[in-house]
Amino acid sequence: MRSVQRTIGSAADRSLVRDSSLVWLASGVVGVSFGAVSVAGGLPVWVPVLMSLVVYAGSAQFSAVGVLLAGGGPLAAVATGLLLNTRTAAFGLAVAETLGTGRASRFLGAHLVTDETVAFALAQPDPVRRRRAFWISGLGLFAVWNAGVLAGALAGSALGDTARYGLDAAFPAVLVALVLPALRADARVRRCALLGAALALAVTPAVPAGVPVLLALAGLFLHRRPAAAPGAAA
């Protein structure tokens, strides 16, 4: 935990906070939507609030609540959430060195691993900045997401039809903005992303929700495969 405190305490780079704020804003908006949808659908306020603190996985939470509101049982909801969140295992490997070596740092860091925090961290040019970016974006995102969920849950059905406002589109839009620089700069990244997207689109009509995301990870694994050493035989 001390390593986390030192990292956050030394993170005086205001540009990281400025860049993270866009993701925090989107997180708060989508969190309000999640809390409102959950309570408007008939769940008690404590369910989305507790889920956001303990599970903390936006897409998995939406899916699990969708299963519950559609009449599915708790086991089906949990299975759906786990399936969607399997991708974070690969994300954790991508930022394992960024989390630090302390047990508390790794435990807390694992809880903060999301699409957005990993994308933001890996977009940085050096290890020190990656570590700062992960913790700044991760802790801020966790705080704003949970505050948004609480606000939305308390508002309940007062917001009406949340889908009408397009609130759910905020997070995907921000994530696309984060990965665009890498796609523009590296042809290998573009090839891997296109492969993953093609696989996901091809199987979407035929498989359950969450499976296309897992298949799309093939692109990530190809990207992480070591390139041939310079001068190696073809």
Image: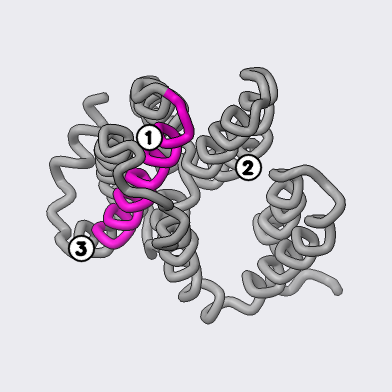
Q: Position of residue 3 (x, y in %)?
A: 26, 31
Vertical placement of residue 152 versus 52, above or below = below
Which residue is the site of mark 1?
Answer: 100
Residue drawn at point x = 63 percent, y = 27 percent: 77
Q: Residue 169 location in percent, x, y?
A: 47, 61
Residue 219 vs 79, above or below: the answer is: below
Residue 69 on image: x %, y %:
57, 31
Q: Residue at x 18, y 50 (%)?
A: 11
Tell me the mark number nearer the camera, choosing from 1 and 2.
2
Q: Which of marks 2 and 1 precedes in the sequence?
A: 2
Q: Amino acid at mark 3?
A: Arg
Instruction: Confirm whether the magenta stretch covers residue 67.
Output: no
Alpha carbon distance from label 3 to label 2: 28 Å
Separation of marks 3 and 1 at Cα, in angstroms: 24 Å
Q: Is residue 29 magenta?
A: yes
Q: Residue at x 32, y 48 (%)?
A: 159
In the rendered view, does 152 fall on the left or right side of 64?
left
Dominant secondary structure, magenta: helix
Q: Which residues are magenta?
A: 21-43
Packing grade of label 1 (10 A; few <14, some 14-19, many >=20) is some
Q: CA distance from mark 1 to mark 2?
A: 21 Å
Residue at 16% across, 59% down: 13
Task: Tell which circle, 3 or 1, labels the residue nearer the N-terminal end.
Answer: 3
| SS of the residue under disc 2 | helix
Q: Which mark is residue 23?
A: none
Q: Which mark identifies residue 18?
A: 3
Rendering colour mode: one colour
In the depicted view, which residue is nearer to us: 54 or 90?
A: 54
Q: Is residue 102 visible?
A: no
